[in-house]
Amino acid sequence: MKKLYFKQKIIKITDHYEVYNENQEIEYYVDQDFKFIGFSVNVTDAKRDYVFNIEKEILSIFPKFYINFRDGSNITMKSRFSMLRKKIDIESDDLSLRLEGDYFNYDFTVYNEDEAIAVIKKKFLSFSDTYELTIFDDYYTDIILAVTIGVDCIKDDERRNSQSN
């Protein structure tokens, strides 16, 4: 089992932050590229070696993300509405991932088929977005971090859209 923690900046044009393990050691660096349109994030490990990239599809009714990992595998995340609830679909060639939980309170469990592989929690009483990821099998660490960043982007977009209306 592994725990990861990260805290985003309060005032930001793009995201640049570190992801720490339970010993407060840096495990990852998250660097968002500045774009007027779109969303692109590069994640590197503690040695600054490429781990994965996330790209948001620009022309889509609901947010859609493409995640490309260093081993060549890919995941697609799509947001959609279903029976007045928010759903996020996660598609992969070799995994059957699903996200369950309370989208509005940001408390999720991630499953591969029927096996719980991680829990994602957001701390609410903080000045910035602060997350705790509990990953039950180290194999899924990169995947869970990527899914969390994608879900966070969806939430940030919704917050910006509701403030502009």
Image (cartoon, rainbow, N blue to C red):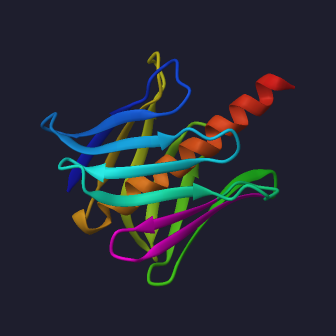
Query: Residue shown at 54%/50% (left/top)?
Result: 40
Q: Is residue 35 left or right of residue 42?
A: right
Q: Nearer the viewer, residue 143 or 122?
A: 143
Quarter holding the C terminus?
top right
Residue in view at x 49 percent, y 78 percent:
96
Query: Camera-side residue: 95 or 82?
Result: 95
Which quarter of the picture shows residue 61?
bottom right
Q: Residue furthest bottom?
A: 94
Q: Which residues are magenta?
A: 65-81
User: Which image quadrant for residue 161?
Assistant: top right
> Is residue 74 within the magenta segment?
yes
Does the magenta-highlighted stretch encompass residue 59? no
Position above or below: 135 against 165: below
Position of 98 with respect to 145 (left or right) is: right
Q: Residue 45, percent across and down? A: 25, 52
What is the quadrant of the N terminus in the image?
bottom left
The residue drawn where x is 39% and y is 57% is 144
Residue 10, percent across and down?
A: 49, 19
**Front residue of this view, candidates 66 and 97:** 66
Quarter of the image holding residue 131?
top left
Relative to 137, residue 31 above or below: above
